Amino acid sequence: MRKSLRYWATGLMAGIISIAAFAQTVTIRGTVRNSTTKQPVPAVSVTVKGAADGTFTDDNGNFAITTSAKLPLVLIVSSINFETKEVTIDNPAGTFEIDLVPTSSLGQEVVISATRSAQRALDAPVTVERLGGASLRAVAAPNYYEALTNLKGVDMHTASLTFRTITTRGFVSSGNTRLNQLIDGMDNQAPGLNFSVGNIVGLTELDVDNIELLAGASSALYGSGGMNGTLLISSKNPFKYQGLSYNIKQGIMHTDGKQRDISPYYDWSMRWAKNFNDKIAFKISAQMLYAKDWQADDDDNVSRTSVLSTVKPGNRKTDPNYDGINVYGDETSANIRDIALLLWDASGRPANFPGTSVPASYFTNPSNFASQLVSRTGYQEKDLVDYNTINFKFTGGIHYKITPAIEASWNTYWGTGTTVYTGADRYSLRNFKIAQHKAEVRHKNWFVRAYTTQENAGQSYNATVLGRLINEVWKPSLNSSSPATVAASWYPQYIGAYLTYKYNLFVAGVPADDYNAHNFARGIADAGRFVPGTPQFENAKKSVKSLPIPRGALFLDRSDLWVGEGQFNLSDVFGFSDKVEIITGVGYRQNVLNSQGTIFADTAGKINISEFGGYIQLKRKFFDVLTLTAAGRYDKHENFEGRFTPRFTGVLNFAKDNNLRVSYQTAYRFPTNQNQYINLNVGSGILIGSIPEFQDYYNLDNNPGYTAESIIAARAAANPAALVEAVYKKIKPETVVSTEIGYKGIIGRKMLVDFYVYFSKYNDFIGTVAVGQSLTGSPTGVLNPFTTRNLSYNQNSDAEVKATGWGLGIEYQLPRGFLLSGNVYSDRLKDVPPGYVTFFNAPKYRVNLGLRNENVFKNVGFNVILKWQDETYYEGTFVTGTLPSFLWAEAQFTYKVPNSKGIIKIGATNLANSYFRTGYGSPAVGGLYYVSYGYNIF
């Protein structure tokens, strides 16, 4: 009975509340149109003035808003590219038609990244680049990520069709640890790799609302890693962007057959969002891309010295020690004279070289048999790497408005793909997966969120190691277990054939012929070698790829990242926003490394690494013309001392829509997880971490490493006294201090000008050191490559490096809807000590020129961009050398289908199909030509 009464009372109370709510609220319905075209405008904000009630128009421009505000009331109707309009409502009956007047958007876009609070891009105190809805719809690029190269100050490294890495103000490479990439506020890096894997995981093409790029130092607000910028990509809120959208894009690549036969390109995407009574909304989106990737096919010869390898003359026929850039397996190299003498000595110094009739008196004479490095025969990358590039992404979320002003949400972002990454080696990331899950509660004055990143390396492997181990599976380089295994090894067979060929010429009185002797020896040693495409090769390849490092090429990685953070605008909460704006935030993050010993030193179990930090920012406006901002952040990493990074900015509005800005910024980056804990055998050596535990594990105090340069000299002179001990010090954070002066303004209501110049000073650069450690315990052990352990680790440099740069961007609105745009920018290093390696890799000059019109003639639009990049001295752990300058064009033509929501696009990137590289070891990029049909693209 009591239960029945409770149910009855609950039902009665709910009914009373419903009746009261019904009596106190009104619903207003309407349609928003473009005053010029009379077409409906989606995603328009409609709010009640003086109240928290608000909604957005749907994909047909319709809206319905329920409010308890008393009549008459005022609706505020606003959208980017339109004048804001206020509409007075006396009677809610009927459907209201509201026309918005198009207006110039030059400098009027709202950005958040510069100060973590909303402001016009024109008023930002630091350099901010933005791509909004209209710009994203009109990009002359296959996707929004590639369109980032159109922005001022941006460089992009292309390691694969889907693995692109951006940076600003230098340090261009594949996998950038100096730039933060945030997706809906989440750090998008792969926990095990410590950098974002391009756009393999993240937002789908149709779910991107806007992109903001904060150039240069940005740690004061965004934490470790913001040395050279922070990229923020925001998704579309399902309350604002509703309905079904899809885009079908197909194209062709490799049209000239230079790398492979012509091949198709597929990129399909969809998004669906629904809003239920402005209380709950959901969205789902998915995207699938498939293509045959660009191939890394550079067969130039490499001279491997210390950290940097350089290009040298020669090929497989002319250089016995040939090491092709994109040829793998030929990294195995040894001095055949040293091996010959060791084998002869181990055999008891017989009269002839073992297995031959060549007398000892001949081959022990250096004039007959001099020192000579010989490499094994390698395999081309195309025979080892999976070029079937695929990327599938899915995002989904549910949003709930607890009150009109507080919104809770759960969002999931999942991506998988196959791509290629260029690091010290080339890595085939096969069936690589990353998932991110985020719970968030947000108010205009605060937010709290928690999220996790879950990484799964799939069947990813090291292509360089794969080539080396396929050789070893077929025939070991040197197996000295027994006389029989020695005779079956590659180097003894090579040496025997080489000496026999030369000795026969000697006996016949014919002059020595090293060229033919080496090629004859290689032919003998390579007899029966696994040939790509044969069952023997494919079986060996499959076997090696399936075995974890160090026995195989597979690396296992299921590392995680867990983050909790919040931000509060104290000024609005406590009611003094008219005097000063105070924003503060805190955060905690934990990395959980889990590679089962294939990447990190985690064979004993997972490694947990914790960080915490907080920031505060104060902003005040003086006399309505001067805005000053001061910010500071403190971060603590469990392995390093805490870091404080301040920032000070000022903006002077000296005329309407004309601002001068100046900023002093600091930034840092804690050494990455790999810098600290890596323990990766790459075949030619071992990459180790730079924390004290590794110094103990490898006994570097009692059995020190020697510098690579001194080992080369000692081996050449057979003199151990030439060896120089390497220093192993605990690594510490890298820092930068940057000062920037800029101007941004609108001239004559038609031209937007943005100019900046900056000066940066870097300290404690994190670089790479290569050393050799004796396996015998005696320094003389490093004179023999077979008794040397090659180690590579990171260390800070004592040198201070300065960088300076500038950039100029102009947008000019021409008559009849034409928009002319262009930018030029430059970055340079100064005062670099001789021999110091910075990996700066920035071209001296870069230029972008563009012209676009969204409706040049009867629903036809176009966008054309011309790009030029100066030559680059590229320092990389793969290869170092000068990359030539290149020029390329992107073009796109659009047709909006009348009386529908459809749009047809025809476009091309690298229109002339002129191949270029953005880094050594990475592929030559050609043209991509495509056509697409999109529905309801907003």
Image (cartoon, helix red, strand yellow):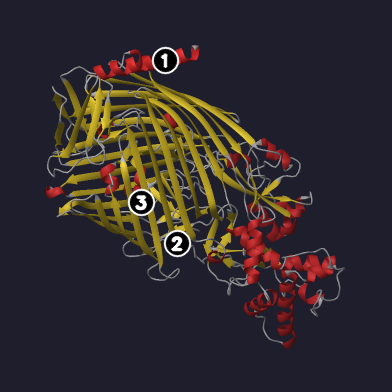
| Distance in Å between CA atoms under marks 1 and 3 | 57 Å
Q: Quadrant of residue 210?
A: top left
For the residues marked 2 and 1, what is the alpha-carbon distance in whole angstroms?
A: 70 Å
Q: Nearer the viewer, residue 366 or 574?
A: 574
Indicate the position of residue 529 as horizontal and vertical percent values: 66, 73
Figure check: 744 above or below 252 = above
Q: Nearer the viewer, mark 2 or mark 3?
A: 3
The three-letter amino acid code for the residue at tag 3 is Asn
Asked which quadrant contains residue 715, the reply is bottom right
Q: Are marks 2 and 3 in contact (CB under 8 Å)?
A: no
Helix, strand or loop status at disc 1: helix
Dot 2 or dot 3, earlier in sequence: 3
* Sooner in the amino-acid sequence: mark 2 or mark 1: 1
In the depicted structure, whether residue 745 falls above or below residue 248? above
Q: Which kind of residue does numbered mark 1 sit on?
A: Trp
Disc sitting over residue 294 in the figure = 2
Q: Is residue 402 above or below residue 773?
A: above
Residue 935 place in picture, x, y as percent: 28, 50
Count of numbered badges drawn on the protein: 3
Q: At 73% across and 57% down in the image, what residue appears? A: 783
How packed is label 2: few (under 14 Cα within 10 Å), some, or many (20 or more)? Answer: many
Residue 281 image point, x, y percent: 36, 34
Under mark 2, the amino acid is: Trp
Which one is in front in this view, the residue at disc 1 or the one at disc 3?
Answer: 1
Question: Which residue of the protein is positioned furthest toward the bottom in this rendering?
Answer: 508
| Depicted 304 relative to depicted 15: above or below | below
Between the C-alphas of marks 2 and 3, the distance is 17 Å
Q: Left or right: 480 with respect to 439?
A: right
- Where does label 1 land, which residue? 8
Residue closest to the far front: 1
